[in-house]
Amino acid sequence: MSTTLSVNLNKIAVLRNSRGGGEPDVVRAGIACLDAGAHGLTVHPRPDARHIREHDVQALAALCRARGVEFNIEGNPFAPPRPGYPGLLALCEAAQPAQVTLVPDGDGQLTSDHGFDFVRDGAALRPLVAAFKALGSRVSVFVDAGDAEVARAAACGADRVELYTGPYAEAFAAGDADAALAAAADTAARAQAAGLAVNAGHDLNQANLGVFLRGVADVREVSIGHALIGEALYAGLDATVRAYRRIVDAAVR
């Protein structure tokens, strides 16, 4: 089964926002990624507008519709609206993304660093998942590798889970990824047995991605942003996206 590559554009917006104005242009970066072979684009608009903002979401949604590729919007479904942030559901109502990835993050988190607790949050997630699916979007929920309760995501109505791969990436960098990779593979298998498809993301890079895809069966999509944009500072965006495409294409089972 083939794996698709969705490029997360958050870091382009971080750089733009650090200076103000419109450069670097998030849409232009998205075009460059798609031209280089990315299968789709991902954004994670946070309520504090630290990177991607509402106008970016709408502009990128239009780009993805025009190019016939998938747009994936990530976010916390429990975060209430605030000035400049209408709420995740309202953003998705306007953008109509192919996929919505629900993530339990808060303002105090520098980045997403854990999955949902389905025992605690399952009942609250169920109507929210239904609301996003009513828009015609596929719904994925963020899960920890090693979560023995991952099958509960199916009871919430989700279509997919996204494995949080941060611990795997850390273990890989330390030279001992076997246990973390096994945990991810086991969680993926549990999810698939429950009828859920599997995505993955967080700190995946050119060094660790191929090993991950060979070790975890039938990963449908990887969403990669921080490492890809960082590597692109040295090699260029076009060359870097093409390098990631070669990795995911080589991992086809």
Image: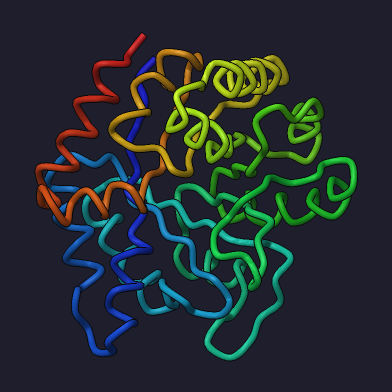
Please give left or right for residue 29 compared with residue 136 in the image. left
Residue at figure coordinates x 44%, y 77% from the top left: 54
Residue at figure coordinates x 50%, y 14% from the top left: 217
62 vs 42: above or below: below
Closer to the camera in the image, 91 or 52: 52
In the displayed orientation, state which residue is furthest to the front. Answer: 174
- Residue 187, x across and y down, in percent: 67, 22
Quadrant (top left/top right/bottom left/bottom right) for the C terminus: top left
Residue 17 lies in quadrant: bottom left
Closer to the camera in the image, 63 or 52: 52
Residue 16 lies in quadrant: bottom left
Residue at figure coordinates x 48%, y 17% from the top left: 218
Residue 237 visible somewhere in the drawing? yes
Residue 61 visible somewhere in the drawing? no
- Residue 68, x across and y down, in percent: 26, 47
Residue 209 lies in quadrant: top left
Closer to the camera in the image, 110 or 106: 110
Please give left or right for residue 189 compared with residue 206 in the image. right
Residue at figure coordinates x 85%, y 55% from the top left: 124
Quadrant (top left/top right/bottom left/bottom right) for the N terminus: top left
Please give left or right for residue 133 compared with residue 230 in the image. right
150 vs 72: above or below: above
Closer to the camera in the image, 122 or 95: 122
